Amino acid sequence: MKAIIATDEADGTAGMTLAERPQPRPAINDVVVEVHASGFVPTELTWPSTWIDRINRKRTPSIPGHEFAGVVTALGYGTTGLSVGQRVFGLTDWYRDGTLAEYVAVEARNLAPLMGDVRFTVGASVPISGLTAWQGLFQHGRLKAGQSVLVHGAAGAVGSIVTQLAREFGAYVIGTGRAADRQKSLEFGANEFVDLANDRLEDIGSVDLVFDVIGGEIQKRSARLVRAGGTLVSVVGPVEARPADGLAVDFVVESDRAQLCEIVQRVRDRRLRTNIGNISTLDNAVAVLNSTERRTGKTIINIRP
Ligand SMILES: NC(=O)c1ccc[n+]([C@@H]2O[C@H](COP(=O)([O-])OP(=O)(O)OC[C@H]3O[C@@H](n4cnc5c(N)ncnc54)[C@H](OP(=O)(O)O)[C@@H]3O)[C@@H](O)[C@H]2O)c1
């Protein structure tokens, strides 16, 4: 099968190439899925799981990409809950070969059914950002209606879904980003917007929840804005600053079938808009993923256009 592979950590996305790889076989409780569309988070080539396995052995060449939509073509020994021919979408294991490929083997429990009225490109765009937003807001952030949320990177893949879900659940959203992101953030539902380069973040006063996708100095300044009893949630590694009288949580998104169903149902009934930037073919993917043009939203690789 055709797949994008990464062989050298130092090269980052520039080192990715299109190659011929053996078709995956389903292990116990796996399905093999014919991938129709795949998402890609640019930072994943800096994650250890792209280069080593769970017991620290080198696992290159590895196939990046961990969110996708496609059609089940085979079941592993003992696999239940999904069937051959079924449309599915979801998140694959970080330590296994991923979804920038014509086929992927994945544990069935990591996937959810994708209804026929949701395009594969749309299904592939929501697993990582949707689950990250859901888990950050509701599990780790314990968001309640009426609270205020500072959403960094509100025009980005994760931030745009955080904004929409927080608004749906009755929160007041202050989005942040670059000057050019203002309009897009407001269109996704932010009540107000802070241009991090030109506005003073501290002018927003205090908030109940910070959802951070940036880190560094922005995170440190944001921690000081968390109200007593509030929470700072980070998805960019261990927190660098804690609220004086609140919680700080960093987490890596996990697959969850029930949450995937909640998210895709919102896409179907238009409560949730996806945030797709570029769409590319597999043959053009390496060039597109290495483009220096500023992109906003998720890059989707259409494996079977
Ligand atoms: N822990 C987890 O489970 C998890 C899950 C998903 C994502 N993540 C991480 O979360 C981060 C965001 O992911 P994403 O997919 O949402 O990325 P994305 O689509 O690129 O969104 C990030 C947004 O934040 C903006 N931004 C970044 N730094 C900024 C700064 N200093 N000032 C103003 N705006 C800034 C970006 O603008 P520019 O494009 O102009 O920089 C972009 O609009 C990544 O680091 C990713 O690895 C973690």
Image: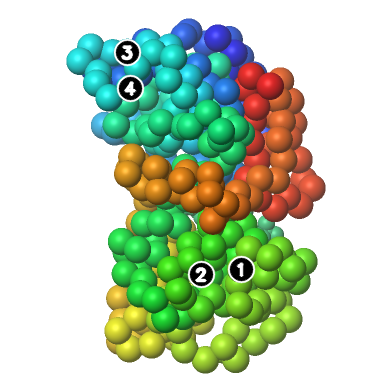
Kindly report which numbered mark, 2 or 3, lies closer to the viewer in this rendering.
Answer: 2
Ligand 1 in which quarter: bottom right
Which element is circle 3 on?
strand
Q: Where is residue 86 in the image (x, y as percent from the top left)?
A: 43, 20
Q: Foreground residue, 236 or 122?
A: 122
> Which mark sits nearer the N-terminus, 2 or 3?
3
**Is the residue indicated by label 3 positioned so its CB lies within 8 Å of ligand 1?**
no
Between marks 3 and 4, how big is the CA–CA gap?
A: 8 Å
Q: Residue at x 67, y 70 (%)?
A: 186
Between marks 1 and 2, how big is the CA–CA gap?
A: 7 Å
**Is the residue indicated by label 2 positioned so its CB lies within 8 Å of ligand 1?**
no
Q: Disc 2 designates what residue? A: 167
**Mark number for residue 82?**
4
Between marks 3 and 1, how big is the CA–CA gap?
A: 41 Å
Q: Where is residue 129 in the image (x, y as percent from the top left)?
A: 50, 50
Residue contact at pointers 2 and 4, CB within 8 angstroms: no
